[in-house]
Amino acid sequence: MELRGKQKSYLKSQAHHLQPIFQVGKGGLNEQLIHQIGEALEKRELIKINLLQNTEENAQDVAVTLEQELNCQVVQIIGRVLVVFKPSSQEKIKKFLLL
């Protein structure tokens, strides 16, 4: 699923007030963390992920890994913060994306 420009703009505006709910630290991005992020995306659809200063992970690499593993869309990368979207199996933001 590829998001169009207006869809990304809408999701960015919705994510503006969100606080990061996951932090990638010294341990890096592991299978357990990816699984937890996937569960959170199913419940919330739109989340922020913060990369801490002590991690050796690169924001672009984390974005690519998450997109491949979870079939999600990284909407925006600002410094060390990623905004990630994946439509839930339930109807939430999905209605907007059908426009």
Image (tube, grey):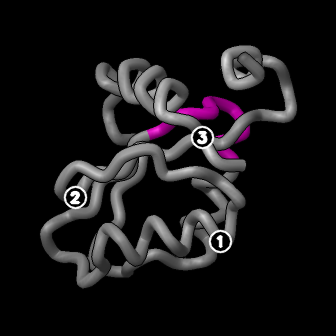
Q: Earlier in the sequence, mark 1 or mark 3?
A: 3
Q: Nearer the viewer, residue 61 or 27?
A: 61
Write down the quadrant of residue 75 in the picture.
top left
Number of residues whose C-alpha sits closer than 10 Å to that of mark 3, classed few (under 14), some (14–19) or many (20 or more): some
* Image quadrant containing the C terminus: top right
Q: Earlier in the sequence, mark 2 or mark 3?
A: 3
In the rendered structure, find residue 80 and report the number of the disc placed on it: 2
Residue range highlighted in magenta: 39-47
Number of residues whose C-alpha sits closer than 10 Å to that of mark 1, classed few (under 14), some (14–19) or many (20 or more): few
- Residue 61: image location, x then y, percent: 40, 77
- Look at discs 2 and 3 and give the one toward the viewer: 3
Q: Disc 3 designates what residue? A: 3
Residue at point 72%, 36% (across, down): 87
- Residue 74: image location, x then y, percent: 49, 52
**Residue situated furthest right in the rendering:** 89
The answer to whether residue 42 is magenta is: yes
In the rendered structure, the answer to whether residue 56 lies left or right of residue 18 reads: left
Write down the quadrant of residue 33 in the picture.
bottom right
